[in-house]
Image (tube, grey):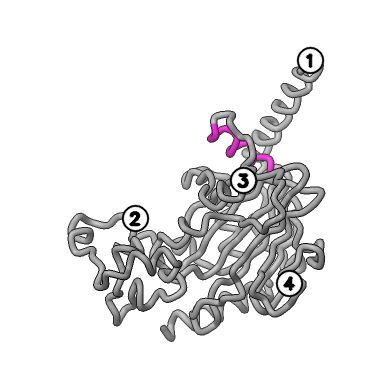
């Protein structure tokens, strides 16, 4: 735990200082060709994968939230949107229902994609969070939304199923919105972060910007104030990408042997209910385990 604590502190310091007519048909084809041309140019014109500390702004301390202005280039935004559309097979209609957004983990970008890999490397360079502790980038398309309820930027269930405490969340904005979409933290003591009418335009989705917020305190316990929400998008739609970092490496979990699954069980009959309530993330040591504790609900938390 002491090692994990020192790692989190190092990450925090690094971020802080780092920290319908023929005309329209032709027009659509021209737009598609322009996008493809920009992607081809991006593939051949490799830009320095460096970090500019002057573009990093601390937005909040409780929870810890940082904004990087202009993190992605125009070409990178176009590429990730194009990749999402291509992967969706042309069915790229935005998600318009709140429940759909929470249940859709997004389209994961191929881990061997050269451009996506460069973006992921830049994220790690900025946050000092190791790539081994994260999933691949996921691309999502949402809006417009008629509900006035708060929405979310990702599927919380799929995040918790990894079986490791979520350390930090990165959101990359691939397009602009004219209204709504601001990031909220309803449990924050600062009312500005819990009200769409008071929230600053600084947190409104802006193409190319990136936001990282930490889900754990410096002592590696869950930060309740980091529970996020999002203002609805009444007009237009939004493309964005997410990347999640966990306290420990999750790469080894992808190659579990059959013997690992044979020993997978719960120690308490209440485990399924606790897991459904989100305790795998909130009380990870008891539920999933630690180096000196096996974990009571490893099966229900998908930790084995």
Marks 3 and 4, the one that precedes in the sequence: 4
Q: Picture coordinates of residue 287 (x, y %)?
A: 35, 73
Front disc: 4 or 1: 1
Q: Is residue 80 visible?
A: no
Residue range (magenta): 77-88
Indicate which disc, 4 or 1, sits on the residue closer to the N terminus: 1
Mark positioned earlier in the residue sequence (3 or 2): 3
Determine contact: label 3, label 1, CB under 8 Å. Answer: no
Are the two marked residues, 2 and 1, in contact with CB atoms closer than 8 angstroms? no
Secondary structure at badge 3 equals: loop
Whichever of callouts 4 and 2 sits on the residue coming sooner in the sequence is 4
Quadrant location, the C terminus = bottom left
Decide if residue 257 is in sight here.
Answer: yes
Please tell me the numbered disc located at residue 254: 2
- Note whether 16 is above or below 22 in the view shown: below
Residue hosting label 4:
59
Identify the residue under disc 3.
Answer: 97
Give the CA separation, mark 4 to mark 1: 46 Å
User: Spatial distance from mark 2 to mark 1, Cα to Cα?
Assistant: 49 Å
């Amino acid at each position: 735990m002491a090692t994990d604590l020192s790692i989190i502190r190092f990450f925090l310091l690094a971020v802080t200082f780092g920290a319908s007519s023929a005309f329209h048909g032709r027009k659509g084809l021209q737009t598609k060709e322009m996008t493809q041309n920009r992607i081809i140019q991006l593939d051949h014109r490799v830009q320095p994968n460096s970090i500019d500390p002057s573009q990093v702004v601390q937005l909040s301390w409780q929870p810890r939230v940082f904004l990087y202005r202009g993190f992605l280039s125009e070409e990178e935004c176009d590429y990730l949107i194009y990749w999402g559309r291509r992967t969706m097979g042309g069915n790229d209609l935005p998600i318009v229902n709140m429940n759909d957004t929470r249940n859709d983990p997004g389209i994961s970008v191929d881990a061997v994609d050269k451009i996506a890999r460069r973006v992921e490397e830049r994220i790690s360079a900025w946050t000092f969070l190791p790539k081994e502790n994260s999933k691949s980038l996921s691309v999502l398309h949402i809006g417009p939304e008629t509900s006035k309820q708060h929405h979310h930027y990702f599927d919380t269930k799929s995040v918790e199923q990894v079986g490791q405490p979520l350390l930090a969340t990165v959101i990359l904005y691939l397009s602009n919105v004219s209204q709504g979409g601001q990031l909220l933290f309803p449990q924050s003591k600062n009312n500005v972060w819990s009200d769409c009418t008071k929230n600053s335009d600084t947190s409104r989705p802006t193409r190319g910007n990136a936001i990282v917020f930490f889900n754990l305190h410096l002592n590696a316990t869950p930060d309740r104030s980091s529970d996020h929400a999002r203002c609805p998008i009444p007009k237009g739609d939004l493309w964005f990408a997410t990347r999640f970092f966990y306290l420990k490496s999750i790469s080894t979990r992808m190659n579990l042997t059959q013997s690992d699954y044979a020993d997978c069980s719960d120690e308490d009959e209440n485990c399924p209910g606790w897991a459904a309530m989100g305790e795998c993330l909130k009380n990870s040591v008891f539920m999933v385990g630690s180096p000196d504790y096996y974990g009571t609900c490893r099966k229900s938390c998908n930790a084995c």
